[in-house]
Image (cartoon, rainbow, N blue to C red):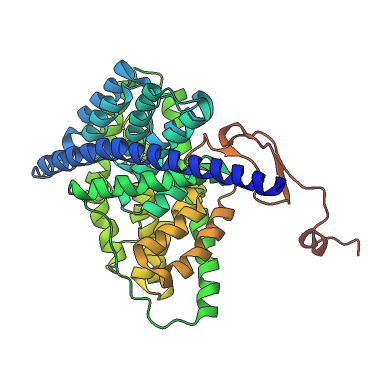
Amino acid sequence: MKQLNRDFVEESVLLASTLKWILLSSFAGIVAGGTTSLFLNLLSYGIKITSSWSSYYLFLPFALFISSWLVIKFAPEAEGHGTEKVIESVHKRNGKINLKVIPIKTLATIITLSFGGSAGKEGPSAQIGAGTASFFANLLKLNQDDYRRFVICGISAGFAGVFGTPIAGAIFAAEVLYVGRFSYRVLLPALFASYISFFINRYFGISHFRYSIDVGSQNDFHMFIYMVVFGIVVGIVALFFIKTLTFFENLFKEKVQIYKPLKGFIGGIILIFVVWVTKSTDYLGLGTDVIDRAIHGDELTGLSFLGKIFTTSITLSTGGSGGILTPVFFIGSTLGNVWAQLVGGNIAMYSGIGMVALLAASANTPLAAITMSMELFGVQTATYASIASVVSYLIVGHHSVYPSQILTFSKTPSIHCDINCELRQIHELKLSNKPHLFLKFFRNDH
């Protein structure tokens, strides 16, 4: 009888908690989905207007100047690529986000992307959604733990609203906060918020990626080997991207000591120079048309992913406002496209797998990447994408486009490093003292 009473109490509490979070997360999905759909529609309208001008990118210096000025003048918390700021807020301020971030991030991102700044729209969507959730969490007077979970719903809602992948959005929100730990407690709220946001954004006319990739008949063993090799390549490129982004961020932050908006003006001039050199605007803006071409199997130039790495690093380092994941998808899909041409593989399949594998590596979110590949490309492609995603996640090491992520475990017992700290705070990294077969092989003491 005692056990029966305990089980009854446990199930009653779990049921009440589940119903509570279904209601709270649905509400979070409504408010976050509503604000992100408004932002995405305004952004689409802005891009439509400027794209009608053949030389729209010539306004980039002024656009990045204004974008930077808006942020530092009215909402410094809106600086950078949005998801990173939400992660930082969750870890350092229990998810509290200033309400001013919402209009300023919206306006600064629309200006940046409309005139050709190379960035994404998912980061601002996550920050706008999380900011809205934070405002209502204050009104609802949620306790500290519930407040954090409620705000995290904004990350999943922003992700799902932009990419149309609600399951991946929920897993991304539960996975992106830590490296080495999955936040199961936020999974249910994140999932409900993702789906509600997805429905709302679709209702308001937001279009999403949808692809049909014909994998054809493949030798599974051969494909396993090919995916391991491709995952290594993706991991190396992800590390190069992170290092390039960090280099330019440090360069403009520490070496270029001038008024911040002037850095944006300089960044705009550099981007114009890129257009002049390449004779193409493919590396500006969101680049979703290039992603579409890559995954539809069109052959792209071999330098596409390098060009996007450079323009994205310049845009975000000099004061442009926007996200990081749409450039990640551009870089990954074009890398896969070029790799397929080199090895004689299925261009569409490699482009799609490259897109999600670079997400796994750059953001340290392999589970979200695998789930996203299922939602976008189907199970057969996801089977191969899972291999490349996990390998690339390991190869990139303890680096991320989100340096505020908390490292809870080293990715390999062969390496000892600082844990339970932000990735940017890792100072010590050394090989384990444990003897390894690989090291023994090269020793002469046997």
Res 292 → quadrant: bottom left
Left or right of 257 on screen, residue 386? right
Task: Report if residue 132 is visible in the image.
Answer: yes
Q: Nearer the viewer, residue 439 or 220?
A: 220
Q: Nearer the viewer, residue 99 or 392?
A: 99
Residue 86 occupies quadrant: top left
Could you say where residue 83 lies in the image, as x and y percent from the top left? 41, 37
Tell me: residue 41, above or below residue 207: above
Q: Quadrant of the C terminus?
A: bottom right
369 or 118, which lies in front? Answer: 369
**Residue 202, image x, y percentages:** 22, 50
- Classify residue 22 by image quadrant: top left
Residue 95: horizontal and vertical position, in percent? 46, 28
Please determine whether, in this image, residue 295 is positioned above or below residue 141.
below
Point out the residue furthest to the front here. 1
In this picture, residue 20 sits left or right of residue 207: right
Where in the figure is residue 253, as x and y percent of width and height?
A: 44, 25
| Residue 241 visible, this angle | no
Residue at 20%, 27% (x, y): give it: 62
Total labels drawn: 0
Q: Nearer the viewer, residue 131 or 296?
A: 131
